[in-house]
Amino acid sequence: MEDGQRMYSQQGGLTNMSGNVLPQYNMGQDEPSDQRKQEIGDILQQIMTITDQSLDEAQARCRKHTLNCHRMKPALFSVLCEIKEKTVLSIRNSQEEEPPDPQLMRLDNMLIAEGVAGPEKGGGSSAAANATAAASGGQPDSAIEHSDYRAKLAQIRQIYHTELEKYEQSDGSEIKNSDYEAKLAQIRQVYQTEYGKYEQACNEFTTHVVNLLREQSRTRPIAPKEIERMVTIIRKKFAAIEMQLKQSTCEAVMILRSRFLDARRKRRNFSKQATELLNEYFYSHLSNPYPSEEAKEELARKCGITVSQVSNWFGNKRIRYKKNITKAQEEANVYAAKSAAAHEGQGTVSNWFGNKRIRYKKNINKAQEEANMYAAKTAAAAAANVGPEGGAAGYNVGGGQAGMYMNLNGGDNYQSSDNSVNALRHVISQSGGYSSDSMHSTPASMYEQHMNQQITPHPRSQNGSPHDQKPDDSTDSWCAGAFMQGLDGEGDNYDGSSDEPGLKRPKI
DNA sequence: CCCTATGATTGTTC
DNA sequence: GAACAATCATAGGG
């Protein structure tokens, strides 16, 4: 077979074959049948023996030429093709038309999603396969390409690993988006380069095989369908390489991603100064703790962090701040209910109340202390700059008179509280009111100022001037903060937000 | 070593 | 797409 193949491929001068097939096809009908049989037998004999013989070039050329020029040759060729097609090919054809490999599709999807195979390239992968198919036809000796590409893929992996090692050597904490993008771009570039090479090799090989087959089709029965089938086979073979390349790339992306995300996930505390700045902003904008983009940028700049970190911080802060308050509220509600029940049923007011008081205060203190501290700070700073009036104005950044996002003041809600609230107030008042060291250490007037001017839209009608009272010597100080507001039954610290045009998310 | 605080991520809701 | 809510994972304090 090898000899035959070599010989066929060396036949360069038989290019006019196909054109002659049809005209000569009917000629055989003029021949006497026995003579025809004889001739066909001769031809077959020649075909059978030709591959067994080791011929020198001159001999081969001569014999082939003779054979090719025989007037029966086209007819015989057609018949053989037909037979071949009807037997072998029909069976194999039934196995074709399989759906695209789901695994490959997944890889493609991932590469597109990760931006490694861009839209133009992503379509390219399937389009490339089609192009490959269109160009093609061949013998499965792609083993060479296979090993070649394995080597290249190994090279790609090495590049990735080198890059990743560089990562680890450099300070992992310094990994930023730009780094990730850069690495991804590298991967993309390598991938696209390799993919280009792959495509080229695939096309070249397919073209080569198709040419070979076409060449051979002059001397042996090779139907177009068979060539197509070969193309399919080649494509499948190459698909393995393609798959490997894509898998490799996906792997690299995944590793990069995980390293990058891991690195980012590693929590690093902000500097104390940054936290101070953020807290200052937060508590001085308690009514509407949603910094604008500009504010975020400025904070980010001042704190030496990114804008998204600022956003994260505020998101976390809002939630946790609210959580503290909500927790206190919930306890208060339960507390109130218990109290009412105790009153009604003459139940024993036990240590339970004492514990509740303590825990309730604890939750409240946490939020309050912080709020107070930053309120005082801001006020002091503002006062230093603008004077007392200006300082007060400084709190009211979110548009105080409009309903506040975080309404920390009981205000009217307190007045409209139901029985359970009254019961709660009663118990609370019996507890001796709110007092804590932290409150003493904080300018009470500042606290009140903050609470009334910033948090509450309206001054509390019953509490008199906030500046005249200290939280710890007033029973109402228990509910002076935000924390009693939930007792009105709605339990919504954010209430009023729905009325507020300025608030971004009227909810909860 | 346990616990809390907190920055970051992920999933859900609007 | 922004904000919320839940969760993860670590820092840091006791």
Image (tube, coloured by chain):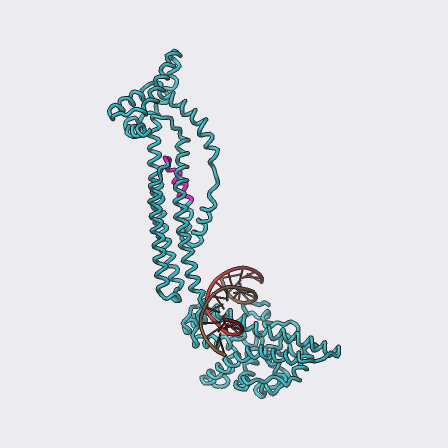
Chain colours: A cyan, B red, C brown
Give coordinates of residue A423: x percent, y percent.
69, 79
Whether A154 is among the magenta residues is no
The percent position of residue A86, horizontal first and vertical second, equals 45, 26
Q: Residue at x 56, y 83 (%)?
A: A448
User: Is the residue A269 above or below the residue A260 in the image?
Assistant: below
Query: For the point 36% across and 35% down, which residue is it?
Result: A139
What's drawn in magenta, residue-wise? Answer: A126-139
Relative height, residue A413 to residue A245 (above, below) = below
Question: How many numbered discs sit on the rendered protein?
Answer: 0
Dominant SS in magenta: helix
Which image quarter is the N terminus of chain A in? top left
Query: Does the magenta segment cover residue A134?
Result: yes
Q: Is residue A197 visible?
A: yes
Hey, which quadrant is residue A403 in on the image? bottom right
Tell me which residue sits at (33%, 36%) in the image: A208
Front one among A285 and A134: A134
* Residue A79 location, quadrant: top left
